[in-house]
Amino acid sequence: MTIAITTYLIYLAISIALTVWVARTLHKNGRVFLVDVFHGNEALADSVNHLLVVGFYPATSRPSDLMHSPPFRRHDDAGANSSL
């Protein structure tokens, strides 16, 4: 395995761990706010809270970024200069 792949896998693992941690924190602490916003309707607050967490994962993971941009790109100096 090359250093680029190793670095990319470490970055991916850290990103996934941080995303899960932030989602759990927002889910836990957001419930109190949502219950207040929905005037004590806990069932509605829990439902909205769950939907927000479900929407948070795809919004933060951005799978298109993982597929379309490699972690390290080598730039061709000749090509860069000719495009100027």
Image (spheres, rainbow, N blue to C red):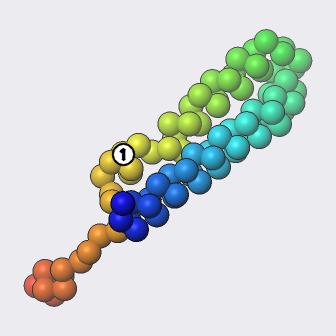
Q: Is residue 66 left or right of residue 16?
A: left
| Image spot of residue 68 (x, y percent) | 30, 52
Who is closer to the viewer here, 67 or 83? 67
Query: Residue at horizontal 75%, vertical 15%?
Result: 44
Who is closer to the viewer here, 7 or 15? 7
Query: Residue at horizontal 84%, vertical 15%?
Result: 42
Query: Residue at horizontal 44%, vertical 61%?
Result: 6
Q: Read off the residue under disc 1.
A: 64
| Image spot of residue 49 (x, y percent) | 71, 26
Q: Is residue 13 left or right of residue 32?
A: left
Who is closer to the viewer here, 28 or 18? 18
Dot 1 alpha-carbon crowd within 10 angstroms: few under 14, some 14 to 19, many 20 or more:
few
User: Height in image: 78 above or below 46?
Assistant: below
Who is closer to the viewer here, 49 or 79? 79
Identify which amino acid the numbered label 1 is placed on.
Answer: Ser
User: Height in image: 80 above or below 49?
Assistant: below
| Image spot of residue 12 (x, y percent) | 50, 52
| Residue 78 visible in the snapshot | yes
| Image spot of residue 45 (x, y percent) | 77, 20
Query: Residue at horizontal 65%, vertical 49%?
Result: 18
- On-image quarter of the N terminus: bottom left
| Residue 84 visible in the snapshot | no
Q: Quadrant of residue 77?
A: bottom left
Number of callouts in the render? 1
